[in-house]
Every structure is written in structure tokens, then in C-alpha cells.
Amino acid sequence: MSSAHSAVPTAGSVPSPSSTSSSSSTAVAAPTITELLDFVRRTSRNEALIASLPLDPEGRTWIRLDGPGGSEAWLIGWPPGTGTGWHDHADSIGAFTTAAGALKEHSLAVRLPTDGWKTLELTDGVDRSRELAAGQGRAFGQNHVHEVLNESEDVHAVSVHAYYPPLPRIRRFSRTGAVLRLEQTESPEDWQ
């Protein structure tokens, strides 16, 4: 989440669409990428939950959800013409699905160094792009670098995201041609 966009208060009272509860006192296993993708797909079909998200015509809005197995999950509204900018999710795995409208994802098929760099020249052939209409999503591994956009001129998009472990940080990048530059690192306090 970017501090440049508006946020709605987190909605701890919004029930998670996953009804996985256990009366056992054993520890819950960490969710897999497949389980995160199943969760965001299932949640994206919860019409009442999707309709509960307040939409702002100028900035992204979001509600925090209870994800499976201690994961961090978000319902996000995207006004026309908005996006995340280039970023990663540190060591977290994740998944997201478009629930309404359409989103476009640009990603890099490259693993970036974790620390100690400010500028990186990308090689040819690392760019990927995909359209994600309502009901479509994707999962990704650690250190996935991407940007997500609502390129529509007049339609809001809504999506569901889940990450495990909960995001320890997000690195934000700028890009000019083949040059990727680390601009800032955000911690959970910056977006919650």
C-alpha cells in the first residue's frame, strides 16, 4: 500500500471468507502458494465482501482481511488510472485475483539482490506482462518484482491479495528503460 493513496480503516470485523477453524491446539501450518491462490480466488467470489469496500474516485482503498494460516490479506479498490508502481514483497510468497474490473501486471523475471544496491541494469528478455480480468489471478514466489495497474479510463477494479509470511517490508523502485533504481523501503507501519 502506498502512502500516496487513501486508505479506509482496517476492518477487523469483516469476516474472512475462509471458514477454517480448528479446535486443536496444534500450530497451524504455513500456507502454500496454492493455498494462498485458492483463498484469493474464493474470496474474490464473495459478492457481499467485494461490495463492502468503499471506493474512492481518486485513490486506492483497502480493507485488511484474515488470510489462511496467519497470512496477511487485503481487499483493494483501484480507481481508473491508478497503480502500485514497481515494488517487491521481500521474502513473502503471495497471490492475488481480480474480483471486479481488470488489472494489468508488469513483472520482471529476475531475482534482485536483497540488499546493498541502489541501481541495477536489467538484461533483455526479463519483462513479463499479463491482463487479469475479473476471476483471473496469479501466485508468485519470494522477491517477486512487479507493478499492478488499472488501465481503465472509467471502471474501478477490485482485487484480493494474500502474503505469507505477513509482509516484513516492501521495496519500491523506479524504472527508466533497462535501469531499475531502489527508491525506498517501507515497513508495515507505513501501510497499516
Image: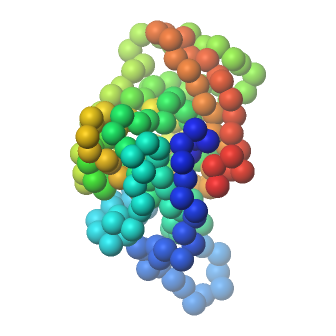
Q: Residue placed at 35% from the left, 64% from the top?
A: 50
Q: Which quarter of the rendering shows the C terminus?
A: bottom right
The residue lying furthest to the right in this view is 116
**From this viewpoint, is residue 148 visible?**
no
Q: Depth check: 56 or 159 in front?
A: 56
Image x and y of residue 103, in percent: 32, 40
Decide if residue 170 is on the left or right side of residue 148.
right
The residue lying furthest to the front in this view is 57
Tell me which corner region of the image, top left, top right, bottom left or bottom right, holds residue 117: top right
Q: Residue placed at 54% from the left, 48% from the top?
A: 6
Q: Residue placed at 58% from the left, 38% from the top?
A: 4
The residue lying furthest to the bottom in this view is 23
Answer above or below: position of 160 versus 124.
Answer: below
Decide if residue 157 is on the left or right side of residue 54.
left
Image x and y of residue 118, in percent: 69, 17
The tally of labels here is 0
Q: Residue placed at 31% from the left, 47% from the top?
A: 156
Tell me which corner region of the image, top left, top right, bottom left or bottom right, holds residue 42: bottom left
Answer above or below: position of 70 versus 57.
Answer: below
**From this viewpoint, is residue 63 visible?**
yes
Answer above or below: position of 108 versus 99.
Answer: above
Q: Which colouring convention does the figure follow? A: rainbow
Image x and y of residue 135, in percent: 25, 54
